[in-house]
Amino acid sequence: MQLSVIIPTYNRVKILEKTLNFLEEQSLSLKDFEVIVINDGSEDYTKEWLESYQKKLNLVVLNQKNAGQGNARNNGLKKAQGKIILFLGDDMLPSNKDFLKTHLKIHKKHPEQRIAVLGKIDWPPDLRLNDYMKWMTNGSSIFGKFGGHQFAYEKLDRGKKPDFNFFYTSNLSLKKKILGKEPFDLDFSKYGWEDIELGYRLQKQKGMKMIYAPEAITYHEHPMDSSGLKNRMIAIGKSAHIIDKKYPELKKLPSFWKKCAFYLLSNPVSLALIWIINLLTAKHLQALYYYALSKKYFLKGVNQGIIY
C-alpha cells in the first residue's frame, strides 16, 4: 500500500460523499491507496451512510465519540497501511484525477523521511465568494502582512518558503514513520493550534522540511460568513495558553503591549469608526474591519485564560 488518505468528519455527510466520489475517480490504482474515514461522533446520518457506501474505494471506516480532529486523525493513523499519509479535509475536493499521484510523485523524488508535501487549497471556481471568504484566505490583506486566519497561500505563491505555520492538515502528506503512533497532541481538544503545534514539533525535533506543491490542488467547498468568527477566535485565544506553555519561544500568546494594541484596534469605538469609514469608502476598509473584529474575539478568549 503506497498511500493512506485520512479524513476526519463531523456532521457533513453530503460534502463527504462528494469528496469520496472525487477520490474514487483518481487515476492512481485503487490497490495503491486506501481511504480511512473517522466519523467523529456525528449526529446526522454519517454513520448509516458510510455503512451503506457501496463504491469502489478501498475504504476503512472508524466510528468514535466526538473527541476532535486531532484524536480522530491519531486513531486513523493507527489503522493506516500506507507508507505515505495524506491528511485531507472532508470538504476538500481534488481538482484533477492526478491529485494523489502528484503527492506520491514528489515523495518519490524526495524519499527523505523528513520531507512533507503541502498541497494548495483554493475555492471552487464556480463558488461565489463573499468579502469574508476572500479575507479569510488572504493572510496579507492588511499592510501586506496581516489578514485572515484560514489559509495564507498567497504568501507561498509570492515565494515565501513554507514552515510549520503552514502545516495545513487539510491537504498535506508525510511519511508515516516521521509521525509516530499518536502525533497530534490531545491537550488541544478544542479548535486551534493542534496543526501548528505538530508542525513545529516535527520541524524542531525531526528536521521536517515542507515542499509546497501548488499543482496538488483541492477545492474547499465550504461557504462561510462572519457569523462563525466569534467562536472560532475565542477558541484560538483560549488555546493560545496551551501552546505558549509548551513553546513560549513562539510567542503565540500576546504580550501586554500587544494586547493593548489589539484593544485600541478592536474596542467598540474603533470598530464603529472603522465600519463607518468602510461604508463611506466603498468597503475599502472591509479587511481591516474583519481583522479588528477577529482581534476583539481573540482577546476575549485569551483573557478568559482557560487551559483545556
Image: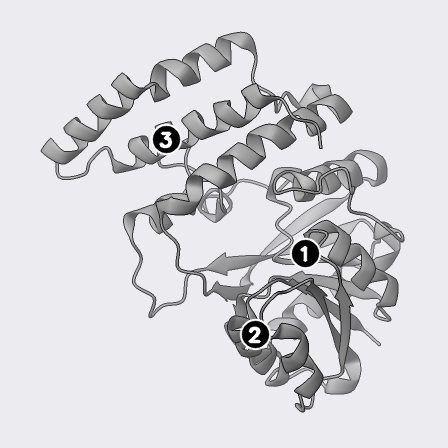
* Mark closest to the chain's N terminus, 3 or 1: 1
Q: Amino acid at mark 1?
A: Val
Dot label at residue 293: 3
Q: Secondary structure at mark 3?
A: helix
Q: How is the image coloured?
A: one colour
Q: Amino acid at mark 3?
A: Leu
Q: Dividing the image into 4 quarters, which one contains the C terminus?
A: top right
**Rendering coords of residue 58 (x, y %):** 76, 83
Query: For this rendering, which residue is in front, 122 or 21?
Result: 21
Q: Is residue 305 left or right of residue 2?
A: left
Q: Dividing the image into 4 quarters, which one contains the N terminus?
A: bottom right
Query: For this rendering, which residue is in front, 155 or 172?
Result: 172
Query: How far apart, in angstroms, are the residues tagged by discs 2 and 3?
Result: 33 Å
**Rendering coords of residue 282 (x, y %):** 13, 39
* Disc 1: which residue: 117
- Between label 3 and label 1, give the one nearer the viewer: 3
* Mark closest to the chain's N terminus, 2 or 3: 2
Q: Is residue 306 left or right of residue 215?
A: right
The residue at the point 30 percent across, 20 percent down is 268
Q: Local crowd at mark 3 within 10 Å, few (<14), some, or many (≥20)? A: many
Q: Examine the image and state in which quarter residue 199 appears.
A: top right
Tell whether label 1 touches label 3 (CB within 8 Å).
Answer: no
